[in-house]
Amino acid sequence: MVKLVPMEQADFSAYLERGIAEYAEDKVKSGNWTVEEALERSRKEFEKYLPDGLQSKNEYIFSIVDGAGDQKLGMLWVEVKMDSPSHDAFIFDFRVEEQFRGKGYGKQALAALDEKLLSMNVDSVGLHVFGHNIVAQELYKKSGYEITNINMRKVLRKTDSTS
């Protein structure tokens, strides 16, 4: 079984640049942002939720490690709002590194998160998944997540930012 351990600063610095770039790419790919604006908008969203880095209020960023604690398999970032009437959590980012995918680590990490959140008296956990990420959608379904909303879009005319 994998473990979730608080992310170390060196790993966080590397994650931040990669996460900002990948989120920008996903927003462009999904048609939400243009290429020209994506990186700056992504950076601003990360700054909004992580103004104090790893010490940002209500934000928990974990490294996913193997059972022995020897190998970092990925990362998971969840926000927990304990100051609201219902104690809800939201997964902002979740990644199992490419070389470790398809081995059950993602499902184990989500189960470990469930245990952590239950110990914090969290009532529910949500997330957003991009429509083009079918593999992640299947993982979430198998882990008990249900669809709560669906946005749909039809491209009528291809432009540079939608190709």
Image (tube, rainbow, N blue to C red):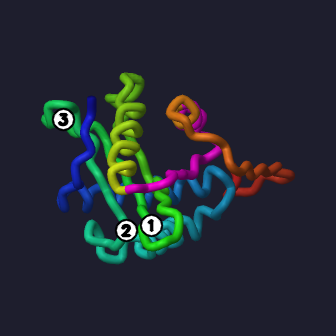
Kind of residue at badge 2: Asn
- Mark carried by residue 58: 2
Q: CB under 8 Å between callouts 3 and 2?
A: no
Q: Tell me: residue 56, above or below residue 159.
A: below
Disc 3 from disc 2: Cα separation: 27 Å
At mark 2, the secondary structure is loop
Q: Which of marks 2 and 1 is nearer the N terminus?
A: 2
* Residue 155 shown left or right of residue 9 in the figure: right
Which residue, given by chain and number where applicable, does mark 3 sit on? 71
* Residue 102 shown left or right of residue 5 in the figure: right
At mark 3, the secondary structure is loop
Q: Nearer the viewer, residue 92 or 84?
A: 84
Give percent across and percent down for residue 17. 35, 61
Give percent across and percent down for residue 29. 62, 50
Name the quarter where the N terminus is drawn: top left
Residue lying at 53% horizontally and 54% vertically, measured from the top left: 25
Is residue 29 within the magenta segment?
no
Residue lying at 50% horizontally and 33% vertically, measured from the top left: 143
Is residue 130 within the magenta segment?
yes
Question: In the picture, residue 131 is in which quadrant?
Answer: top right
Q: Earlier in the sequence, mark 1 or mark 3?
A: 3
The local crowd at label 1, few if under 14, some if 14 to 19, many if 20 or more residues have their Cα within 10 Å, is: some
Q: CB under 8 Å between callouts 2 and 1?
A: yes
Kind of residue at badge 3: Gln
The local crowd at label 3, few if under 14, some if 14 to 19, many if 20 or more residues have their Cα within 10 Å, is: few
> Over which residues does the magenta segment extend?
121-138
At mark 1, the secondary structure is strand
Q: Which of 127 and 46 is in front in this view?
A: 127
Which residue, given by chain and number where applicable, does mark 1 sit on? 81
